[in-house]
Image: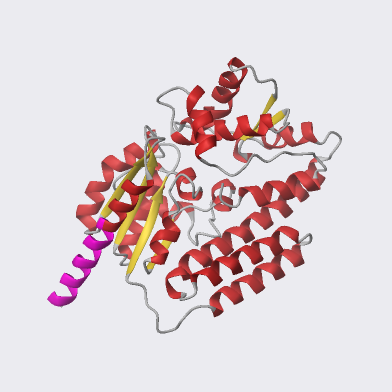
């Protein structure tokens, strides 16, 4: 998911832990997970369950899963998945990595189980270096996303992204990671065609898994970028897992976004519910042409946001397209709605230009 694999591979390698990564998320993983999941469980639970089954079938005997707290059901994923997999006959140990905000020992204990004898100081140094690599990957992802509409040679951009991520993956020291990042960002920027301008500016908000995993969002970022649309995304992996709330990659502090949402939703409702409102307002204030809201079917925090967004849309006069995704959603239907949304935004933009 997103930059997570490169970051975790680096972490486990530095911990000298044997690991198995399942194949990238696919229809097969979704089918495996959906077959044994509770029917009304949200899509991320089903597909990560399928990922786990593929990993166990590949020889893994331990599963490492993120934890969480609050109203969002994500914090319960590992417990539900453990029960479902045990009932299906799989034998394994489940390790849940809780956020550092829950207490340092809750965060470090799974890693100390995997690497017995490691000191907290040594573990923290390893985590910091792997996290630095994850943040570098996110910065490359962001540069490619925001420059896509300015680049004529799309294939060259994709190739350069792949090469840069490979160099970051191979980097060992802090300086090597920074150098790979610097060179990558400079080269990506050099691909921009000065006279090429985006036809539209669209912000993407919503539940983090749908925003970060191309398989489940039908790779809409590449699709929209190929149509000449300038894109910004509200969530990046390293910002999401960082306890600081500074959101270095996204370029905004968490508290600033929450403050924007405050008139409409003044308290945290779990997941990205509150910041979905805040980011939508931020995009409107920065004269974006529209916003796309992505959420899994039955996602409680995003359903709350969805019920509030019409009021935001009216007050800030910004069109919003909501896409609700589950295992029955097809690419053709999503593309059709995206095409219609683009046509609507273009017609609206042209009408506003004629008025002025």
Specify whether residue 126 is in view: yes
In the rendered image, residue 351 lying in the magenta stretch gets the answer yes
Q: Nearer the viewer, residue 50 or 237?
A: 50
Q: Which of 171 and 20 is in front in this view?
A: 20
Residue depicted at x 55% and y 42%:
25
Looking at this view, is 292 or 99 the one in front?
292
> Can I make out residue 97 in this image?
no
The residue at 58%/46% (across/down) is: 241
Please identify the residue farthest to the bottom as the structure is shown. Answer: 195
The magenta stretch spans residue 264: no
* In the image, residue 205 above or below residue 100: below
**Which of the 4 image quarters holds residue 328?**
top left
The picture quadrant where one finds residue 302 is top left
Location of the C terminus by quadrant is bottom left
Magenta-highlighted residues: 340-355
89 sits to left or right of 19: left
- Whether 196 is drawn above or below 293: the answer is below
Vertical placement of residue 92 versus 281, above or below: above
Image coordinates for residue 78, horizontal then vertical, percent: 58, 28
Side of 282 where 35 appears, left or right: right
Farthest left residue? 355
Q: Where is residue 57 in the image (x, y as percent from the top left)?
A: 67, 29
Q: Where is residue 103 in the image (x, y as percent from the top left)?
A: 65, 35
Q: Quadrant of residue 220?
A: bottom left
What secondary structure do most residues of the magenta stretch adopt? Answer: helix
**What residue appears at the point 73 percent right and 54 percent down from the top-left corner?**
129
Query: Total marks drawn?
Result: 0
**Percent x, y of residue 24:** 59, 44
């Amino acid at each position: 998911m997103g930059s997570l694999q490169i970051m975790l591979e680096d972490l486990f390698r530095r911990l000298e832990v044997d690991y198995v990564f399942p194949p990238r998320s696919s229809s097969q993983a979704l089918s495996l997970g959906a077959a044994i999941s509770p029917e009304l469980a949200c899509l991320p639970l089903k597909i990560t369950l399928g990922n786990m089954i593929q990993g166990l079938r590949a020889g893994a005997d331990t599963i490492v899963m993120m934890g969480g707290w609050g109203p969002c059901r994500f914090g319960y994923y590992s417990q539900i998945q453990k029960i479902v997999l045990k009932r299906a006959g799989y034998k394994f140990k489940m390790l849940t990595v809780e956020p550092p905000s829950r207490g340092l020992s809750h965060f470090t204990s799974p890693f100390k189980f995997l690497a017995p004898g490691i000191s907290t100081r040594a573990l923290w140094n390893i985590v910091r270096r792997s996290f630095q690599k994850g943040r570098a990957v996110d910065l490359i992802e962001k540069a490619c996303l925001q420059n896509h509409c300015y680049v004529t040679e799309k294939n060259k951009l994709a190739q350069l992204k792949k090469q840069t991520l490979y160099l970051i993956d191979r980097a060992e020291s802090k300086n090597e990671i920074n150098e790979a990042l610097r060179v990558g960002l400079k080269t990506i920027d050099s691909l921009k065609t000065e006279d090429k301008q985006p036809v539209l500016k669209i912000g993407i908000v919503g539940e983090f898994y749908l925003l970060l995993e191309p398989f489940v969002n039908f790779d809409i970022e590449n699709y929209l970028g190929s149509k000449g649309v300038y894109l910004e995304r509200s969530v990046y992996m390293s910002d999401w897992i960082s306890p600081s709330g500074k959101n270095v990659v996204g370029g905004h502090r968490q508290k600033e976004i929450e403050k924007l949402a405050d008139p409409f939703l003044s308290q945290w409702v779990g997941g990205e519910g509150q910041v979905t409102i805040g980011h939508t307002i931020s995009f409107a204030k920065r004269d974006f042409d529209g916003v796309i809201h992505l959420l899994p079917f039955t996602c409680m925090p995003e359903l709350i946001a969805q019920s509030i967004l019409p009021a935001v849309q009216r007050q800030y006069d910004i069109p919003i397209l909501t896409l609700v995704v589950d295992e029955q959603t097809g690419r053709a239907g999503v593309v059709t709605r995206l095409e219609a949304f683009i046509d609507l935004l273009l017609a609206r933009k042209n009408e506003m230009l004629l008025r002025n």
